[in-house]
Amino acid sequence: MAREFDINRLMELMPPHDGAGESGDWAAVEQAWGFRFPRDYTEFITRYGQGEISRSLAVFAPDELMPPNAPQPGMHGMTEEARCVFEEDGEPTDEVRSAEQIIVWGGSCTADTLGWLTIGDDPDAWPVLILGCSGGAPLVFDMRMAEFLYRLLSGGTSPSPVGAS
């Protein structure tokens, strides 16, 4: 069962700026991807949109919600790139057996890839996954994206798992 995290806690720590957020047809996005996105992610994108956090992290929106000339890469390309890195240099684990299990939602300034490990039928239960830029075994965190960001930004994950590789 998915553990709930109140995104308002993240908003208190990091209020969205005026005009932030991406709107669009999530049903069409999910049809294009073939699955429902986790609720905390769709709420994050609706409130914040795609972009940088403190010049150290980036969160990507689905390409289908972005304008054609968006300044940051979209999820499709980043997901394909991460899957290639995992296939070439990754170390499968008991949890992460296949590159196809990886969907990317963000990245770090140290070239870490942030995503989901898409296991099970409930996207709200997908754990956060970090792939280091040089491959190796991915790190898996049993929490949702918004909680992961909250803990990362509030110092609740020590040492920081981002930039550790």
Image (cartoon, grey):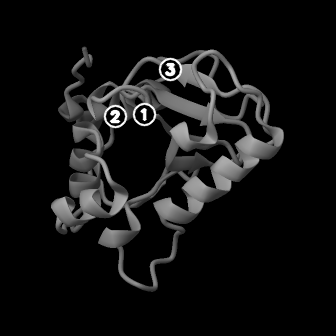
**Residue 82's disc number:** none
The percent coordinates of residue 116 (x first, y second) are: 47, 36
Query: In the image, what residue type sits under mark 3?
Result: Phe
Q: Which residue is mark 1?
A: 149
Q: Which residue is mark 3?
A: 141
Q: What is the count of numbered marks? A: 3
113 w.r.t. 147: above or below: below
Residue 117 appears in the rendering: yes
Query: In the image, what residue type sits under mark 1?
Result: Leu
State the residue at coordinates (74%, 48%). Answer: 85
The percent coordinates of residue 11 (x first, y second) are: 25, 39
The percent coordinates of residue 53 (x first, y second) are: 47, 50
Query: In the image, what residue type sits under mark 2?
Result: Ala
The percent coordinates of residue 62 (x first, y second) are: 38, 62
Whole-angstrom CA distance, mark 1 to mark 2, is 5 Å
Q: Which residue is mark 2?
A: 146
Whole-angstrom CA distance, mark 3 to mark 2, is 12 Å
